[in-house]
Amino acid sequence: MKNGPSFIPSPRAAVVSLAATAALGALHAAPAQAAFAECASNQPAAKVVGDIGAAIEGAVVDRSGRLYVTDLLGGRILRFDTPGAAPKVLSTIPSKNGGGALALEPDGTVIVGTGADPRVFLGDVLRPGAISRVNQVTGALTEIAKGFSAANGLDVTANGTIYATNDFGALVGRRTPDGKVNAAWTVFPSANGAVLSKDDQYLYVSRTFVNPGVSRIPIANPAKPESLLDLGFADLLAFPDGLTLDSKDRPVVPMNGSGDIVRIDAPGKACKLASGLNSSSVVVYGRGTKGFSAGRLFRAGFDGKVYEVPSAFDAGASTNPAA
């Protein structure tokens, strides 16, 4: 997953090889040929961070426009202050607690999910996933929750409720503001990525390995998920990964296998914002007025590179640093 070929088909291929290479050998097939039409604004993606020798799993931009990423195999949290800048190693996560998703709490604090290691295959039973706050100056980690199936997808509501997913399991967990963890808040096989709608009424997730596509889960009725995108047979190896939402709550999804970045405009209606970005693991919008700023979409991948996707520029995004 790092310093390897340009196509890395599995979101955790190197980790998978430690536990079940034979069982998941199909993930090393040739990339799928997605059939999405190009969006009207389609433009080539532009590289803003070269190969940093890391398999990037999670990404988030803080209110100051700084990009944070997790290095899945190196167990590091890296920070980029501006596009093109060299990364700063902010924290090192014990390798047994592989770094997963990143998100922001309502006050702007960065949180990181851990447990993205071979235990994800038994995550629903072992529940090794944990969440820690990251001191954005010193890099110190403070655990605030544990007992999740995993935390490969992560997002936080306005009142501080945290949701966490495991794409190799079936449990979606929740931590309420009083610190209580429910590892089995709902059952949703292969939920990957996690992003809440602006009104916190829906949790959007990618379906990576099981029935590939994208769904949204009503927070008030999680047993009734709504499918927004169902991939056909030709796209079974597209592997939708860590998604985000634009200012209109339209999902933007990286396809790990096919290399496409796709926007879903309505249920069953999607278009391609960029292509040729194989091994994409996560997309994230910027914040604030400088650095990785608001309205700009950034793609990170297991190839250790970060690209800006101009076609996904969101003119409706706020540049308010507090947003």
Image: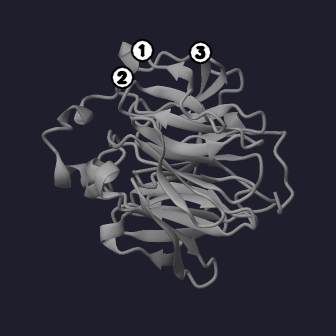
Q: Quadrant of residue 309?
A: top right
Is 302 located above or below residue 35 in the figure? below
Q: Amino acid at mark 1?
A: Gly
Image spot of residue 83 (x, y percent): 64, 61
Mark 2 or mark 3: name the one nearer the start of the chain: 2
Q: Which one is nearer the viewer's eye here, 162 or 43? A: 162
- Please name the residue shown 40% across and 33% down the image: 239
Does residue 240 appear to the left or right of 94 in the view shown? Answer: right
Does residue 80 appear to the left or right of 282 in the view shown? Answer: right
Is 270 located above or below residue 274 in the figure? above
Q: Gap between marks 2 and 3, in whole Å?
A: 16 Å
For label 1, the residue is 232
- Please name the residue shown 53% across and 18% down the image: 36
For label 2, the residue is 236
Q: Are marks 2 and 1 in contact (CB under 8 Å)?
A: yes
Q: Secondary structure at mark 3?
A: loop
The crowding category of the residue bearing disc 1, from other C-alpha atoms within 10 Å (few below 14, some 14 to 19, many at least 20), is some
Image spot of residue 115 (x, y percent): 37, 61
User: Which of the colour schemes (rainbow, by chain, secondary structure, one colour) is used?
Assistant: one colour
For label 3, the residue is 268
Q: Which one is nearer the viewer's eye here, 61 or 230? A: 230
Is 76 located above or below residue 209 in the figure? below
- Please name the residue shown 55% across and 59% down the image: 102
The crowding category of the residue bearing disc 3, from other C-alpha atoms within 10 Å (few below 14, some 14 to 19, many at least 20), is few
Q: Which one is nearer the viewer's eye here, 199 or 4? A: 199
Q: Secondary structure at mark 2?
A: loop
Does residue 22 appear to the left or right of 246 in the view shown? Answer: left
Q: Are marks 1 and 3 in contact (CB under 8 Å)?
A: no
Q: Amino acid at mark 3?
A: Gly
Q: Amino acid at mark 2?
A: Leu
The answer to whether one can see residue 276 in this image is no
Image spot of residue 323 (x, y percent): 81, 57
